[in-house]
Image (spheres, rainbow, N blue to C red):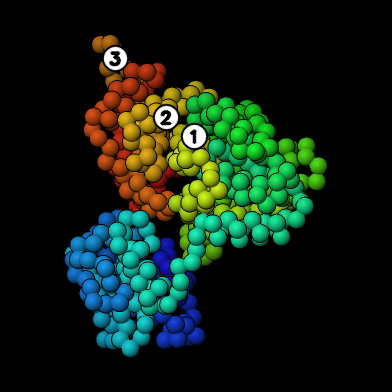
Amino acid sequence: MILSGSPFSVRDQGSPVPDLTNIRTKYPLLGVCYGAQFLAQLDGGEVLPSQIREYGRANLSEVNSNHPLLKNVNTGSQVWMSHGDTILNLPENFSIIASTHDVKVAGYQISGEETYGIQFHPEVYHSTDGMELLRNFVVNICGCEQSWTPDSFVDTTVDHLKEQLGNDKVVLGLSGGVDSSVAALLLHKAIGKNLYCIFVDNGLLRKNEFEQVLDSYKHMGLNVKGVDAKEQFYAALDGKTDPEDKRKAIGKTFIDVFDQEAHKIQDVKWLGQGTIYPDVIESVSVKGPSATIKSHHNVGGLPDYMKLKVVEPLKSLFKDEVRRVGRSMDMSEHLLGRHPFPGPGLGIRILGDITPERVRILQEVDDIFISGLRNAGLYNEVWQALAVLLPVNSVGVMGDERTYESVVALRAVGSTDGMTADWSHLPYEFLAKVSNDIINKVKGVNRVVYDISSKPPSTIEWE
């Protein structure tokens, strides 16, 4: 059993209090972050607010390498922290097995039990030995087998979809991204011609993306229809500046367009979606496990008037697993290697008002940035890259004249699952060239900045 992290503090009223009566001492138990603090407090330890909140990189300064949980985890190993509380004092029967420079109790075991706690997050990419720790717990301590493979996932999922859907028709929204494409192939394997794919131009796509995406699916055997709905989305977004209002407006319009298109296909019963696990975690709150970080039109219930059930074959997978599943189905590397692109598109990368002109500006900026990464051989070194149009102007000088134009922020991060990310250390020379190209070629922009914040505490997207 693993007790996960939580947005709650163990000191909060109403914080999660799992009943461990039939678990503790009977099964191996690992508390992560909140879970570690909960176990410590449960036995009389002291958990208090940290003097300094710790988010992002830390390094283990002391490690009991002989401990079964920490086998092959070395002193100096980088770990990822995300907490505002710290375990100040442990109960007497707890022994420390790992520390960082700032956190004395980074890992512990309860004497006489296979019960462990760690303050950091081993499951994320930036905990460099995190997989070793999890392997130690799951395989060596718990005795489980590592039997999951992409091939087995495809076989199991296709069989499940055949049973779930039978001869029903499914309509699915393609975006040109990895998630929706892999979901479409899985559904196509299961139901063939009963899958109807729709690609909606919401007016918030990258430059020339609508035409490129439709072309990319020509040779995949999928039945795809393109729908130009730009004006509907722009009308729905008119006057909206709050990021949640924009997400919800985009999501509602997306559903409205799908409802219109689905009615053109007789007897459609299902809406297929490329929802993956981070979407679920960040979009749905079941008081305790997670806080709602953002709404997402790929997650959640459909309105009553839309008589479609939802099928989400990827909702238990992270992005890196989705790519592995795509490779097992021989999907092209060009498609699999695409950076993540949000469902609401540029709508959440244009801060403030969304207008066709502001969309044009960001499309041009984004195209220069992404093309530049490809041309410099850096695209595959980055997990996700994006440009953000800020709702502020800055003073500049062009041709000896004063300008007062828009500011854009560039962001590039490294990650595997999107749950945590660190900013990419792109070469200064590259950033200088891209900045120069953007300011010279995109009318309306006179300043470029580069975002060097990690997730947490920031998110990858700005909205």
Give the SS element for disc 3.
strand
Precedes in sequence: disc 1 or disc 2: 1
- CB atoms of marks 3 and 2 within 8 Å: no
Residue at image mark 1: 346
In this figure, what is the number of numbered marks? 3
Three-letter code for the amino acid on which mark 2 is drawn: Asp
**What residue is disc 2 on?**
366
From the viewer's side, name the closer residue of 211 and 155: 155
Sequence-first disc among 3 and 1 = 1
Instruction: Evaluate whether residue 162 shows in this view.
Output: yes
- CB contact under 8 Å: marks 1 and 2: yes
- Residue visible at 76% across and 51% down? 168
Q: Which residue is mark 3?
A: 398
- For marks 1 and 2, give the one nearer the viewer: 2
In the image, is residue 301 above or below residue 109?
Answer: above
Location of residue 19 in the rendering, given as x and y in whole percent from the top left corner: 49, 81
Q: Foreground: 335 or 427?
A: 335
Residue positioned 47% across, 59% down in the render: 291
Q: Residues within 10 Å of mark 2 (few under 14, many from 20)?
A: many
Element type at mark 1: helix
Q: Position of residue 55 (x, y in %)?
A: 30, 57
